[in-house]
Image (spheres, rainbow, N blue to C red):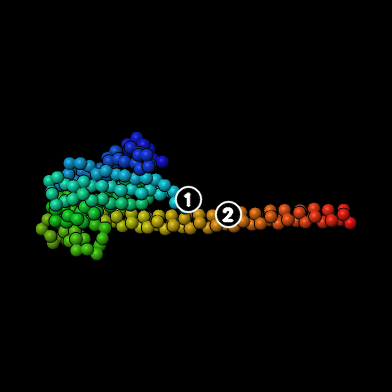
């Protein structure tokens, strides 16, 4: 279980925190939200468990309504990972991407426009790339372009590692199932052998008893 210093755990095992102590993606998410008028930090709720011998964590981040923008309602993001400490970072990063996708027009003229979008098939992604990397744009900046390219490369690398991690965990679950099936089969074989041995002893006893009577 994760360190409980910065969270409150309820009776059902759910851990609650604003995760600002991490200093990483949760803090970056909160700073971005504050820049757009939010007054309450996101709240994270997660619970660790085990599935088929593999550790997993269900993590939810809830973003409250924006008091300065009445049409920005509350919303949430959800991820499944291994531990609470890892899941805070992953779900916060996901929320950052989703926020920039929800509000592309508001993001354009802010420093957060260098954050790459996850879905490369959208018009928002195309516009984000064009704005940051097209040297013909009037506000093109070489440092910003480099930062955007570097962030995009890191995002791609992260997704590759995440996919590999999902595949490894899937293989681990399959191996656990196979091992459990093998153990169950072994137990059944042992039980059958024990029954067979007991019957053999009983037959010997009956045979001896019959021989004594004759």
Q: Position of residue 122 (x, y in %)?
A: 22, 63
Q: Residue 53 carries which label?
A: 1
Q: Which circle's residue, 1 or 2, is located before the other in the chain?
A: 1
Q: Is mark 1 on a helix, strand or loop?
A: loop
- What distance separates the C-alpha of mark 1 from that of mark 2? 14 Å
The image quarter containing residue 85 is top left
Q: Nearer the viewer, residue 172 or 163?
A: 172
Image quarter (top left, top right, bottom left or bottom right) of the C terminus: bottom right
Q: What element carries label 2?
A: helix
Q: Is residue 193 left or right of residue 95?
A: right
Q: Position of residue 51 (x, y in %)?
A: 44, 51
Determine which residue is flagged by label 2.
183
Image quarter (top left, top right, bottom left or bottom right) of the N terminus: top left
Q: Tell me what residue is drawn at x 21 percent, y 49 percent.
A: 74
Q: Residue furthest top?
A: 5
Q: Tell me what residue is drawn at x 47 percent, y 52 percent.
A: 52
Q: Residue furthest left?
A: 138
């Amino acid at each position: 279980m994760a360190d409980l210093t910065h969270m409150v755990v309820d009776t059902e095992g759910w851990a609650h925190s604003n995760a600002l102590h991490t200093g990483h993606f949760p803090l970056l998410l909160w700073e971005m939200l504050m820049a757009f008028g939010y007054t309450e930090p996101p709240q994270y709720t997660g619970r660790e468990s085990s599935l088929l011998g593999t550790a997993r964590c269900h993590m939810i981040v809830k973003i409250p309504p924006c008091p300065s923008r009445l049409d920005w309602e509350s919303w949430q993001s959800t991820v499944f990972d291994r531990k609470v400490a890892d899941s805070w970072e992953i779900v916060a990063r996901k929320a950052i991407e989703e926020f920039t996708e929800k509000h592309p027009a508001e993001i354009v003229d802010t420093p957060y426009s260098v954050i790459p979008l996850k879905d490369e098939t959208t018009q928002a992604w195309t516009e984000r790339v064009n704005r940051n990397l097209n040297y013909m744009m009037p506000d093109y900046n070489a440092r910003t372009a480099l930062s955007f390219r570097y962030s995009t490369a890191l995002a791609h690398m992260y997704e590759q590692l995440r996919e590999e991690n999902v595949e490894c965990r899937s293989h681990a679950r399959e191996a656990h199932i196979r091992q459990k099936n093998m153990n169950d089969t072994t137990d059944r074989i042992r039980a059958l052998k024990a029954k067979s041995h007991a019957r053999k002893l009983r037959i010997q006893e009956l045979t001896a008893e019959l021989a004594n009577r004759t």
